[in-house]
Amino acid sequence: MARKLLIEHAEVPGIAAYDVYRKHGGYASVEKALKTMSPDEIVEEVKKSGLRGRGGAGFPTGMKWSFLAKPEGIERHLVCNADESEPGTFKDRYLMEKLPHLLIEGMITSSYALGARRSYIYIRGEFMYILRILEKAIAEAYANGMLGKNILGSGYDLDLVVTPGGGAYICGEETALLESLEGKRGNPRMKPPFPAVKGLWGNPTVVNNVESIAAVVPIVNEGGEAYAAIGIERSTGTKLISASGNLVRPGVYEIDLGLSVEEFIYGDDYCRGIPNGKKLKACVPGGSSVPILPHYLVTKTAAGTDRLMTYESLADGGFATGSMLGSGGFIVFDEDQCIVRNTWNFARFYAHESCGQCSPCREGTGWMEKVLYRLEHGQGTLEDISLLEEINKKIEGNTICPLGDAAAWPVAAAIRHFRDEFEWHVKAPQEAQTRNYGLIQAPLEA
Amino acid sequence: MIKVTIDDVEIEVAPGTTILNAARQAGGDLVPPAMCYYSKLPGTGGKCRTCLVEVAAGSTADPRPMPKLVASCSTAVMEGMIVKNKTSERVQNNRGGVVEFLLVNHPLDCPICDQAGECHLQDLGYEHGSAKTRYREERRTFNPIDIGNKIKLHMNRCILCYRCVAVANQLTDKRVHGVLNRGEHAEISTYIENAIENDFSGNMIDVCPVGALTDKTFRFKSRVWFLKPYEAECACDKCSGKAVVWMFGNEIFRVTARKDKYGEVETIEDKTAWICNNCRFDKKDPSKWNLIGPRKIDRHSVISQGKYATKNDNNPKLLG
C-alpha cells in the first residue's frame, strides 16, 4: 500500500489536539516556510508539484495562485472551501474531523505564500460539530503562536476565521461561497471578474478546496518535485477518494494517482470488491455530477487500456465513453440497483439545490426531476426519454455557474449508457415497479 | 474606440461596453432580447439567459471562438470581436430553449393579465416560443401575498429577473422585499407579509418585464391597447414629473414613466426619469397634468393596433 501524505496520522489517538499533532511532525511546514522560504518560492514549489484542485474541477493550484492580482495596498484573502456537499463525497469531512490542525497548517503556509493576512474557512452548516473541532484547533494554534501577530518571530501576521454556511450545495461554487461569506444570499456571481481579481469584499481572493490546502503541507515539507514523483503524467500526488455504494469496505482512501480502478475496487488494500457475490453494474467515479460509467467501461477504457485513477484516464473517451475524477466521490452500483431510480434521485438533488437565479437551471432541473419521477413510477413515455435529452442540451453550458452542467451530465450519461433500461421502464411499467432490470446486456459498440 | 462585428455589422463603441449595449447602439433586429438586464439599474443582468450570443472570435489578439454561448448583457466587447446573434442557428435554438424554460411554469393567463400587450415575455414567446408545450406536469403556484394597496404581486407570473429588487436597493433607502427560497421555489416576497411602502416603490411595476407586479389602481380597468398614451408633465417636488398618462376619452386610466423601445425608463436631462408614487397612483385628474402630445410608439407594437395603425393587414405577425 502506498505511503499516505495526508491522513497517515488520522487514527492516532488525540491527534486533533495541538500537542499530539506537533509530536507527529505537525507544523513543520509552517516553520520551514516562514523561516527559510519566500512566498514566491512556495508558489514555485506548488507549481512544480503539479497539484491540481481537489474540489472537482482539477485546475492546477499553482497556476490559480499565480493568477492572484497583487495590487499595492489592497488586502488579499485565502478562502478554504469546506462546503463539501457533492453527493458521494466525504473526504474533507474525514480530514477535518480527524486532522483539523493539518488544514490549519496548510492554511497558514498557503496564506503566507499568497500574502493573505485574513483567511477564512467556509464550512457547510451541516458540519456544525466539525466547526467546533476547528474552532478549538484554531484557538490552540493562536495560543501556541501559530496564528495571530508575528508568527514564529517572522513578522508575518495572520488571522484565521471559520464560518459556517447555511447548508446549501450551491455555496460550494466559489463565487456563491464568497457571496454567502459576505452575508448575502448565496447566488453565484457573473464571471469575469474572477475571484483572483475581485473576490471577497472586492479584494483579490483565492478559493481552494480543503484537500488542496492540506496537500500544500507535504509539498512544502518535501518539495514540489518529490510530490510530483508520485502519480502519472499530469495527475500527480495522492488523492483522497470517498468510496461508497455496494462495496465490501467503503470509506475514505488515500491513493497514489495512477492506481488502476480494478485494483481500487477489488484490491485487498482498498475496497475488496462487491459484497454478496454480486456483479458490478455501474460506477460514478467522481461524485454525483460526473457521468456514470457502465460496467464494461469502469475498469477498461473504450480503447481497451486499463482505466486508472487519474484525471486523464477517467476522462478518456470524453463524455461518450469516459467520465471525470471530479471530487473523488466513488460510488459503485451492483446489479441490483436501478439506474432510473438513481438518476431520478440525483436529479431530485439538483432540483432541490438549484439557487433559482438563472432560468435554464431553475426551470430545467425541476422539469427533469418531474419527468424522471414519471419514468421511475411507470408513467413515462418513450418521448419522455428524448425530451430529457433535449432539456439536457438546453441547460448544459447556458447557465451562470456549473450547477446546470452538473445536473445535466448525470442524466445525459445515464440515458446514453442505459437507454434500454429507461425504455424497459416505459414498456413494462408494472414489472419495473416490482423487480430490477439487472445488468445491462448490450456490449460496447466499437 | 473598439471595433466589434455583430451579425456582420461593424460597430464602434467605447471600451468596456457590453455586447448588448453595443448592439443597441447599432439598433435594428441584431439586438438580443433582455428580460433581466436593465441598463438604468447597475448590477442587473446575466440571469434570464435570453440574451445569449455566440462569440465566433474573441478578439483580434485572441481570435479563438468562445466555447459556450455568453450572456451579451454582461460580457464586455473586445477589439475585433465577432458576435453572432440572429445569424447563429445555435443561438436561436438555445434562446428557444430558454423561452421554453421561462414558459413551463408561467400561467399563460394573458387574457386576464394587465401586462398583456406590453409584456416582454409575450413578445419573446411570439418570436421564439413554440405553439405547443411539452410540459405535462402541474404548473408551479405560490400562495398570494399582499404587498400593499397600490401594487399587486402575482408571483405565479414572475420570471425572477431581480429588477424589482434592484429598484428597491437603488432608489430607496430601505428594501423590505427580496428573493426567498431557492430553485423552483424561489419567490419575490417580504418574508413576513409586509407592505412595500416608499415614495418610489411604484417603479417596480415599470421595470417588471412580465405581469408579476401590476398597478392596483389600474387593475382590470382596461386593456392597454384601448388606451391612448400622452406625454405629460406635472410639477412634482419628489420626482421629475415627466410621465406618460394613458387616457380613454378624457379620463386618465393609469400613469407610467416614459419608456423607450427596450421597455426601460427614459433618461431625460441626464437623469433616469423615475416617477414617484404620488404621480403614478394618485394623480388621475387630467387637470393636474400638462399634456404635451401623443406618445410616439412603435407602429408594430400591440398597443399601436388599437388606435394608431390604420389596419392590421400589413402586420406579418397577425397574418402568420
Image (cartoon, coloured by chain):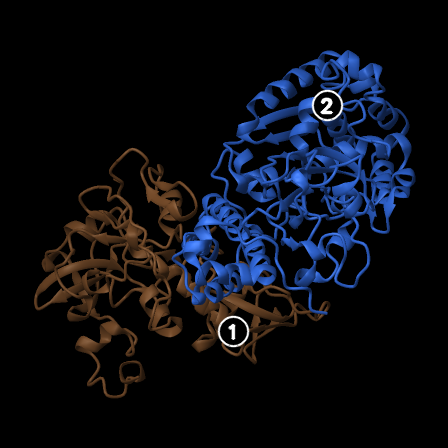
Chain colours: A blue, B brown
Quadrant location of the N terminus of chain A?
top right
- Residue drawn at x 24%, y 38% is B195
Q: Quadrant of residue B134?
A: bottom left
Q: In which quarter of the image is residue B308?
A: bottom left
Q: Name the residue under label 1.
A: B85
Residue placed most toward the observer, A293 or B242:
A293
Mark 2 on the same chain as mark 1 = no
Task: Give the class, few, some or many, for how many residues have Cα within 10 Å of label 1's Cα (few <14, many ≥20).
Answer: many
Could you say whether the residue bearing mark 2 is in a helix, strand or loop? Answer: loop
- The amino acid on which the numbered mark 2 sits, given as a three-letter code, is Leu
Count up the numbered dots. 2
Residue B54: image location, x then y, percent: 57, 70
Q: Mark 2 points at which residue?
A: A99
Q: Is residue B152 above or below residue A24?
A: below
Residue A205 seen in render: no
Residue B141: image location, x then y, percent: 29, 49
- Residue drawn at x 75%, y 27% is A108
